Image: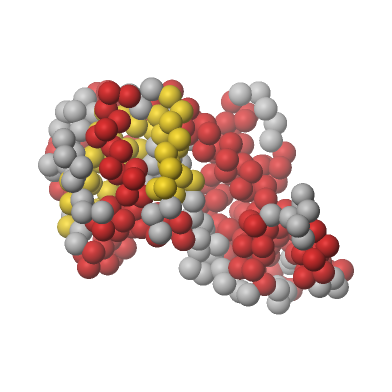
């Protein structure tokens, strides 16, 4: 197989569109599909073929890349694509699907003779658009050369977690990483909300921790989105963060671990979504600290 591939991208939301665009820029033939076709259409300007159905998108593909909402949605779309799937095609499954769903997706891959790669990514809109994602991947060593050009186009580094995608080792690592991201996001919002309530200038807080072990770039990045009211376009939307938080809580429960912070983060995000912030950046969980009638000016 040459380094120039035909890649089918199923799901062109924030992450999928950026990945498809970088694949096209790397010289690969991209066949893109999205349930809402209007979200895929802009990719035509980057040379992508916009398919009308999942089956049309995967026809002749060397690699199928899925970046959809969750595990059940991914399975539904792959079932729609099934008539055109070729045995031996590599399937790069990048949706944050959760531990339980990975087993169902891997079973579908076995049934259709696909080479299954569990390959979620770490990063949000900006690193995705820049092709600087971190790819977490598990899959058979003898077939990795087939997907390496895809990973190289969308990310700067690939961390291999195992030889069997069905074991979900990459997805498990993604959930652990996202649990930290969600906790940090919630803590950032609460610190700013408390500062607002107590009349504390947030800059005073930033100055107090500057350069010490409590300081972190992520705090400043998310704080500025709130303080500058730059919550759209979302780097990572509240609605998607709710889904991931619930997957994390469920994974903990299924393995005998109580995750109080993750559960609280999920509740805050759900409250923010109910207040009308579902499509804003997950930093908008900040507003869950306030009565919607008293929405503050950050």
Q: Tell me the quarter of the picture where residue 114 sits.
A: top left
In this rendering, the answer to whether 94 lies above or below 19 is: above
In the image, 136 versus 232, the foreground residue is: 136
| Residue at (71% x, 77% y) in the render | 297
Q: Total number of numbered labels?
A: 0
Quadrant of the frame with the C terminus: bottom right
Q: Position of residue 122 (x, y in %)?
A: 49, 46
Residue 61 shown left or right of residue 261 in the figure: left
Q: Is residue 209 left or right of residue 280?
A: right
Q: Looking at this rendering, what residue extends furthest in the right direction?
A: 198
Q: Position of residue 183 (x, y in %)?
A: 67, 47
Task: Please name the residue shown 34% across and 45% down the image.
Answer: 152
Coloring scheme used: secondary structure
Q: Give coordinates of residue 178: x percent, y percent.
A: 57, 43
Which of the image's four quarters has the N terminus? top left
Left or right position of 265 against 159 = right
Q: Is residue 156 visible?
A: yes
Above or below, comparing residue 113 to residue 53 in the picture: above
The residue lying at 15 percent from left, 48 percent from top is 56
Residue visible at 43% across and 43% down in the picture? 157
Q: Quadrant of residue 131?
A: bottom left
**Residue 99 against residue 53 in the figure, above or below:** above
Is any atom of residue 278 visible in this view? Answer: no
In the picture as drawn, the residue positioned furthest to the front comes out as 211
The percent position of residue 200, horizontal first and vertical second, equals 84, 70
Please determine whether, in this image, residue 132 is positioned above or below residue 199. Answer: above
């Amino acid at each position: 197989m040459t380094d120039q591939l035909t890649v089918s991208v199923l799901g062109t939301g924030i992450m999928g569109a950026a990945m498809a665009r970088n694949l096209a820029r790397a010289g690969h033939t991209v066949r893109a599909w999205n349930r809402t076709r209007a979200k895929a259409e802009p990719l035509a300007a980057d040379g992508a073929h916009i398919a009308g159905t999942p089956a049309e998108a995967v026809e002749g593909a060397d690699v199928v890349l899925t970046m959809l909402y969750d595990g059940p949605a991914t399975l539904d779309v792959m079932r729609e694509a099934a008539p055109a799937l070729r045995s031996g095609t590599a399937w790069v499954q990048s949706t944050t699907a959760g531990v339980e769903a990975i087993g169902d997706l891997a079973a579908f891959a076995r049934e259709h003779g696909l080479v299954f790669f569990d390959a979620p990514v770490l990063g949000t809109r900006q690193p995705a658009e820049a092709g600087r994602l971190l790819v977490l991947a598990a899959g058979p060593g003898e077939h990795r050369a087939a997907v390496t050009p895809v990973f190289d186009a969308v990310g700067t580094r690939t961390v291999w977690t195992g030889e069997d995608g069905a074991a979900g080792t990459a997805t498990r690592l993604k959930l652990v990483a996202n649990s930290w991201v969600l906790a940090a996001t919630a803590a950032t919002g609460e610190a700013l909300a408390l500062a607002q309530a107590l009349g504390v200038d947030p800059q005073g807080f930033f100055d107090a921790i500057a350069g010490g072990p409590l300081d972190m770039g992520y705090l400043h990045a998310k704080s500025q989105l709130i303080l500058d009211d730059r919550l759209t376009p979302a780097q990572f939307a509240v609605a998607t963060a709710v889904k991931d938080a619930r997957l994390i809580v469920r994974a903990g429960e299924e393995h005998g671990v109580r995750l109080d912070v993750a559960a609280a983060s999920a509740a805050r995000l759900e409250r923010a979504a109910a207040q009308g912030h579902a499509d804003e950046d997950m930093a908008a969980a900040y507003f869950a600290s306030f009565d919607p009638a008293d929405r503050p000016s950050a």
